[in-house]
């Protein structure tokens, strides 16, 4: 079997590592206005690229996920963040 082929269990485990959950630390990676419009979230104008934040709540929808973070008002599209492992 080629090395690049993942078993189904490995793929699920990998996906779960990337999923953002309440209490996770995330890093703000930036924003594209269309991502904000598409998910009807708040524009993250108070967030700083490269800064880390703690996730308060997660709202998973069919095609996107919204999150709130501690000490910052608003609901944000999860694609603006990467999970800190």
Image: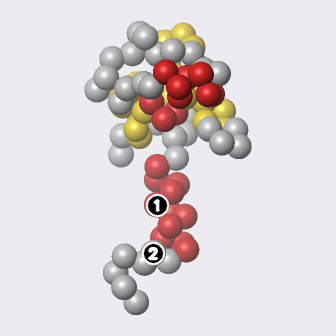
| Whether residue 32 is situated above or below residue 61 in the rendered picture | above
Q: In the drawing, does residue 80 fall left or right of residue 35?
A: left
Earlier residue among tags 1 and 2: 2
Indicate the secondary structure of the residue bearing disc 2: loop
**Disc 1 to disc 2, C-alpha distance:** 10 Å
Residue at (50, 63) in percent of width and height: 13
Q: Name the residue under label 1.
A: 14
Residue visible at 62% across and 28% down? 38
Q: Residue 3, position in %: x, y? A: 34, 81
Name the spot of residue 33 as percent of width and height, x first.
49, 21
Identify the disc placed on residue 6: 2
Kindly state the secondary structure of the residue where label 1 is placed.
Answer: helix
Quadrant of residue 81 within the rendered picture: top left
Nearest the camera: 32 or 80? 32
**Where, by quadrant of the figure, is residue 59 drawn?**
top right
Q: Residue furthest left?
A: 50
Disc 1 and disc 2 in contact, CB within 8 angstroms: yes
Q: Is 32 positioned to the left or the right of 61 in the image?
A: left
Nearest the eye: 83 or 70: 83
Instruction: Tell me the crowding category of disc 1: few under 14, some 14 to 19, or many 20 or more residues within 10 angstroms, Cα based.
Output: few
């Amino acid at each position: 079997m080629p090395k690049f082929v993942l078993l189904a269990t490995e793929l699920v485990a990998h996906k779960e590592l990337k999923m953002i959950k309440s209490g996770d630390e995330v890093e703000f990676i930036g924003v594209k206005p269309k991502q904000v419009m598409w998910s009807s979230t708040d524009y993250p104008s108070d967030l700083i690229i490269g800064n880390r934040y703690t996730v308060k709540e997660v709202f998973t929808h069919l095609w996107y996920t919204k999150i709130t973070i501690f000490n910052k008002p608003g609901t944000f599209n999860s694609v603006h963040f990467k999970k800190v492992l």
